[in-house]
Amino acid sequence: MAAVVRLDRVRHTFPGVVALDDVELTAPPGRLTALLGPSGCGKTTLLRVVAGHLRPAAGRVLIDGRDATALPPERRDIGMVFQSYALFPHLTVAGNVAFGLRMRRLPRETVRRRVGEALDLVGLADQAGRRPQELSGGQRQRVALARAVTIRPAVLLLDEPLSSLDARLAVQMRGELRRVQRETGLTAILVTHDQEEALELADEIAILDRGRVVQHGAPQEVFRAPATRWVAGFLGYENVLDIPGKGPVAVRPEHLGLLRPGDEAPGDAHVVDGTVADVRFRGTGYTITFRTAEGRSLVAVSPDDGLAPGAPARLYVPLSRAVGLEGRST
Amino acid sequence: MTRRHPVVGAVAAVALTFLLGPILLVVGVAFTAGDTIEFPPRGLSLRWFAQALSYGPFLEALRTSLLVAVAGTVLALALGLPVALSLNRGGARPRGAIGTLFTLPVVVPELVLGYALFQTLMVTFRVSAFGALLAGHTVLLLPYAVRVTGASLAQADRSLEEAARGLGAGGWATFTRVTLPVIGPGVAAASVLSLVTSFNNVPLSLLLNGPGTTTLPVAMLHHVEFAFDPLVAAVCTLLLVLAVVVMLVTERLAGFTDVLARQEADRWRP
Ligand SMILES: Nc1ncnc2c1ncn2[C@@H]1O[C@H](COP(=O)(O)OP(=O)(O)OP(=O)(O)O)[C@@H](O)[C@H]1O
Ligand SMILES: [Mg+2]
């Protein structure tokens, strides 16, 4: 049932923008591939090409090895959850979920049974008779998900399905999304610009920048070894500094250690001297900005605020946490 | 709170008097028991209403008016919806040449349009008067159909249609099961607007006139040329009531003003 989706040098331009720049990407069967990238980098455009709503200017879309580039959307067997949910306002929840089944001219009894199953899957069996406008954001998202999976598509596309939910609901829905994808065993492509969401949900991550896939791999691999300076910056490696013998490295704020007077730095660490430039409260602790002797700005997080702007400070960088940037492209 | 300048109030009062005054006068005259147009009415009665509702020429003209209004609206929508679709969903640009073309009849003086249709259709091609009248009204209504349904289409979330396609609906099924229900209020508003526009039209109906194709406004016009009885005043009063009913019903059903306001907003969008 699950299919392989492959994009073969897919290119698309809108007036003045190269939205997809020779994209090569394979979404393996039965796995969840996350597309991660900043706003406007071409994520939605890529999904619309896969779903068949947009015909690419060049390149091919292969589904299970077959060229689907010219296939209309209704013949691709792809379910999609839209960024805006796109629920039909004139139909009830059940009517929305039934839509794809009725288009397949399934017997009435079968439609009813499968709508029931789909609504059970997303925990909305009691909302079947309501209109989308009467539902909360999280409920709408689940209806959209049920509608997309009930046609048992070969591929499921999800366009930032959690972006309009509040933080707590988004985290809760992540689990449900993962469960539904596992239970149905679909090939899924999830678009997001939330790296935490991508790391948590995905089997594979592809990072998109200005229409190009700049890195593609397992979450740990991508996270621990960003391929370019840009990816490092995008994934939260905010600090760039020079370590003698290692060259320029990138470090995440939470990996910078703070040394109290009299403390010893751990063995394999590089020590930097500087002054505190700014202290900001961030709930679980403080974000502290330092200025080093060479004039670089470094950001660290600290659980307490025993520091005042202007105070001298010592930082250390565990070498194992420093991602070398030498030889990587920008 | 803003205070209005006293002149504004005065101008409004004068304008209202000039607008409403004559109308109230006509309504008053319609209730007269006498035989001529005079105000104040000579006694009160409903006899002119009874007369109007049984006056053969007016009844036949009403039948023609309704027939032309309904058929013209159906035709204008049948032609206008595909145009609106291609302007808003196809490749054509709404504010490009084609978009302008479909709004053009609005600025062409209707007498010119009517005379041109009279010459080409009736004189040159010997089309029947009813055929020419219907063609004229369809051309007149087309811009309304294109504009109002187009505004609804522009407003509707395009991903709804993409969702339908993705769920297996072909182009036609997507149109009938998703697009049409979603733009329903716009289609209803376009219908009412077209019906009213056609029903009120004089210039076209006057020029495309022939045996058995006199519309109600034209019949009324002919009547007042020769008669001084309050018959037309009674018809006017009935038409006023009808207009108010249509407005109220539409407002209830489709949020008419909302659709029109959106169309207006659309027109001024850069
Ligand atoms: N229909 C369109 N017409 C013109 N330009 C478009 C169109 N759709 C997208 N673009 C442009 O193509 C680029 C990629 O857009 P896309 O919607 O794919 O971005 P995205 O990665 O989904 O962004 P976001 O995270 O904000 O949703 C952008 O520069 C956008 O302005
Ligand atoms: Mg997007």
Image: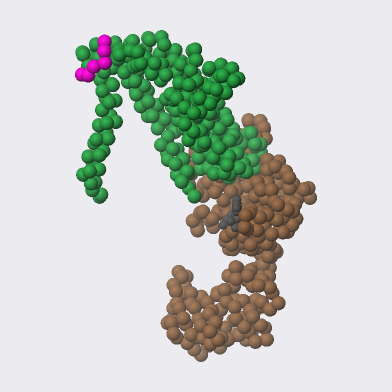
Drawn side of residue A261 relative to residue A64, left or right: left
**Residue A277 horizontal/vertical position (percent):** 46, 81
Q: Is residue B259 left or right of residue A124?
A: left
Front in this rendered view, residue B110 or A328: B110
Q: Position of residue B197 (x, y in %)?
A: 44, 28
Residue found at x 45% / y 30% = B193
**Nearer to me, A309 or B116:** B116
Magenta residues, as a range? B35-40
Q: Can residue B108 be seen in the rendering of this structure?
A: yes
User: Which chain wears green?
Assistant: B
Which chain does brown denote in the image?
A
Query: Which is the main secondary structure of the residues drawn in magenta?
Result: loop
Reply yes or no: does residue B37 show up in magenta.
yes
Q: Quadrant of residue B225?
A: top left
The answer to whether residue A149 is left or right of residue B241 is: right
Q: Position of residue A146 (x, y in %)?
A: 59, 44
